[in-house]
Image (cartoon, helix red, strand yellow):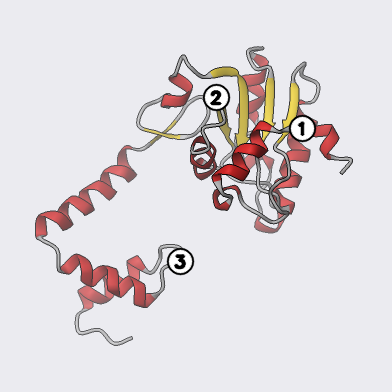
């Protein structure tokens, strides 16, 4: 792709680094910004910069937050004895959109994937165990994607926490194998949470 400006070329190259954005889409986005008022572009730039510099991760559940403790963990209306273990913030958002869950979360920050060099030490596993040591948690729900990585992560986590006197369950598999939570419709995901099954039972399927 030939550019009439090095500034334009550099901007397109940066936008093209975003997931799912090719050069043509990147060019369209950059040209759109050039057609906006300067204050609009400055606002856009400031918002992204502020996001990167000021965003925090909840000290309790590791969800993205504006404060040291996220709104979900800080809420007195949530059941602190019920913890849903998810891969990342997108899964928290997907489950919250179902309006079927009133517990809290634990965001692992990924899944175990030896092929990608991601092991248990790269995830927020130890902090989950620390939360269980408080004795406040009564049930853990594994809500991880129905993939090989998701199942491997659940298997490992179950081994780490099964000695605790808690209920360990997993979302019902109304979700096809290979499916990721963020792409599942809200009704299916909500029912999967509501009809969760004991993890040990899911191994016999």
Q: Is residue 205 left or right of residue 65?
A: right
Residue 157 position in % (x across, y down): 73, 34
> Label 3, on which residue?
20
Of the 4 image quadrants, the one containing the C terminus is top right
| Residue 13 x/y as whole percent | 34, 71
Q: Quadrant of residue 87?
A: top right
Sequence-earlier tag: 3 or 2: 3
Q: Nearer the viewer, residue 32 or 52?
A: 32
Label 3 residue SS: loop
Q: Is residue 114 above or below residue 196?
A: below
Lateral position of residue 26 relative to residue 69, left or right: left
Farthest bottom residue in view: 2
Query: How far is disc 3 from disc 2 in space, using C-alphas?
Result: 33 Å
Which residue matches tag 2?
A: 102
Residue in the picture at 67% in, 39% down: 192
**x, y (%) of residue 152?**
76, 46
Q: Position of residue 65 (x, y in %)?
A: 40, 33
Outermost residue on the top side: it is 135
Residue 87 visible, this angle: no
Q: Is residue 199 left or right of residue 7?
A: right
Q: Which part of the image, by quadrant, shows the N terminus?
A: bottom left
Tags 3 and 2 touching, CB below 8 Å: no
Q: Which one is closest to the eye, mark 1 or mark 3?
A: 1
> Along the polypeptide, which appears first: circle 2 or circle 1?
2
Considering only order in the chain, which callout, 3 or 1, is on the residue closer to the N terminus? 3
Quarter of image, res 35: bottom left
Give the crowd class for mark 2: few <14, some 14-19, many >=20 residues within 10 Å.
some
Q: Which mark is residue 197?
A: 1
């Amino acid at each position: 792709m030939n550019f009439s400006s090095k500034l334009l070329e550099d901007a397109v190259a940066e936008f093209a680094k975003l997931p799912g954005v090719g050069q043509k889409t990147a060019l369209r986005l950059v040209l759109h910004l050039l057609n906006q008022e300067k204050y609009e572009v400055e606002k856009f730039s400031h918002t992204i910069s502020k996001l990167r510099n000021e965003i925090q991760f909840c000290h309790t559940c590791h969800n993205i937050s504006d404060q040291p403790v996220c709104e979900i963990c800080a809420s007195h209306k949530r059941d602190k004895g019920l913890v849903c273990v998810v891969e990342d913030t997108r899964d928290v958002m997907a489950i919250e959109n179902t309006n079927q869950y009133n517990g809290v979360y634990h965001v692992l920050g990924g899944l175990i994937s030896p092929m990608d060099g991601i092991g248990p030490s790269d995830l927020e596993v130890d902090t989950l165990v620390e939360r269980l040591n408080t004795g406040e948690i009564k049930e853990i729900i594994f809500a991880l994607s129905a993939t090989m990585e998701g199942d491997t992560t659940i298997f490992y986590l179950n081994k780490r926490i099964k000695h605790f006197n808690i209920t360990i369950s997993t979302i019902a598999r109304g979700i096809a194998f290979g499916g990721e939570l963020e792409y599942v419709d809200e009704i299916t995901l909500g029912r999967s949470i509501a009809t969760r099954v004991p993890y040990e039972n899911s191994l016999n399927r």
